Amino acid sequence: MKGSTKARAEEVARASYGRLLAILASHDHDIAAAEDALAEAFAKALEHWPLRGIPNNPEGWLITAARRGRIDAARKHARTKPLEQHADYMARSDQHDEIPDERLSLMLVCAHPALSSAIHAPLMLQCVLGLSSERIALAFQTRPSTMAQRLVRAKSKIRDAGITFERPDRDALPDRISTVLEATYAAYSIDWMLFPDGRDLSREALFLADLVAHLSPETPEALGLSALISFLSARQDARLKDGMLVPLDEQNIGLWDHRMIDHANRILANASVARQLGRFQLEASIQAVHAARATTGTTDWEAVAQLYTGLNALFPTLGSRIGQAAAIAQARCAKDGLALLDQLPTRQVANFQPYWATRAQLLRDDAPQQAKPCYDKAIALCTEPPLRRWLEAQAATLKLH
């Protein structure tokens, strides 16, 4: 019983942490205090559930326990707020047949413009998913103590400024949703090859993206991000072989998660209904073309190149311009791809590893002598061991004579 109870408590925590925290913190904007109360409630669940059985509504049980814990804490510490102010707050704890889902409101609070953009993604990972500051610090390449301090300061600012757990006005909502999406993508984009728990973090970010899409289905870009991360996650098991990176066009499609690909295609189709094209929808469309190789056996590189052209016309980045060059090289010839790379600002690409890796690949067949220093530069700039091994293998097979 104890083992199953613990597993059930962990399941509830995984699925409902953000919902419960948002409800608890919405009363007085004190996320830190709500976290403490929720932690105590989970501890009480592990104490009581094995003896009395798992309640029919575990979320309701937890929210009631946490709210009562906060009332007890207020009495014990004689806070300045009159206890009468908690009357409605406590009364609501017994009406818990339907637990409202306030996670989107919590994410909007975490991505509030009054907070530093650098803390948006870490704050969401902790508040919505319950990740520890140590784990978040590892992913963001920051000391645990530093990350913990930043998170504490952000929560204090939310409390002291009285930032409300409400959706902003219609005019302001798109910008706030965009910030949530950017922070979610930033969490996913943390390179899983660098960190022991990187793949777990990718799965958490996928959960966040799906959650935002579920809570905001009227936002095409929310659906686009969910589709994008789903396409990328579907190929997770095919990205490495014997500790070496496997390029996308060489991956074993038998290792792809085809159900997730179907899921991503459906979400992307739903996003397109609104006819409001955005960055994440375009990026998801590129990944959809790559995913189609699972059924066609080939990659439509011309379609990939055209999508990159559209992406760079609307939302240009250095990475997307390099992606366009690589796609055009595949669709047409290496010379055309190199011509695009030559148009990029020298200063911006000087220490940009993807530029040198792509340039090396486009030069390897026709100009191996020129490709060699590009490989050397890409290897020197590379921080991911699996990618470095692949680059070293590519460099070793150059026909220099």
Image (cartoon, grey):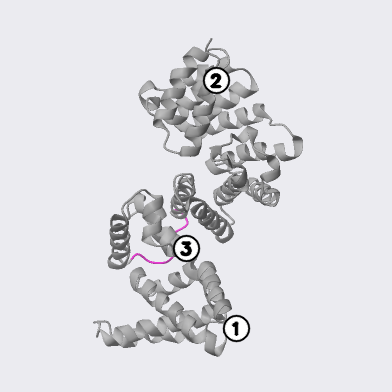
Tag count: 3
Q: Which mark is residue 56?
A: 1
Give the mark, 2 or 3, whose residue is nearer the N terminus: 3
Which three-letter amino acid code belongs to the residue tagged 3?
A: Leu
**Residue located 71% across and 36% down the image:** 293
Q: Are marks 1 and 2 in contact (CB under 8 Å)?
A: no
x then y, percent, for residue 24 = 42, 75
Task: Decide which of 141, 37 is in the foreground and name it.
Answer: 141
Task: Decide which of 110, 400 is in the foreground and name it.
Answer: 400
Q: Which mark is residue 362?
A: 2
Query: Can you tell which of label 1 and label 2 is closer to the viewer?
Result: 2
Whether residue 389 is situated above or below residue 9 in the rendered picture: above
In this figure, which residue is indicated by the disc labeled 3? 129
Q: Could you tell me if residue 111 is visible in this image?
A: no
Disc 1 crowd, CA 10 A, few/some/many (<14, 14-19, 20+)? few
Q: Which contiguous range is marked in magenta?
A: 163-171
Q: CA distance from mark 3 to mark 1?
A: 23 Å
x then y, percent, for residue 268 = 64, 47
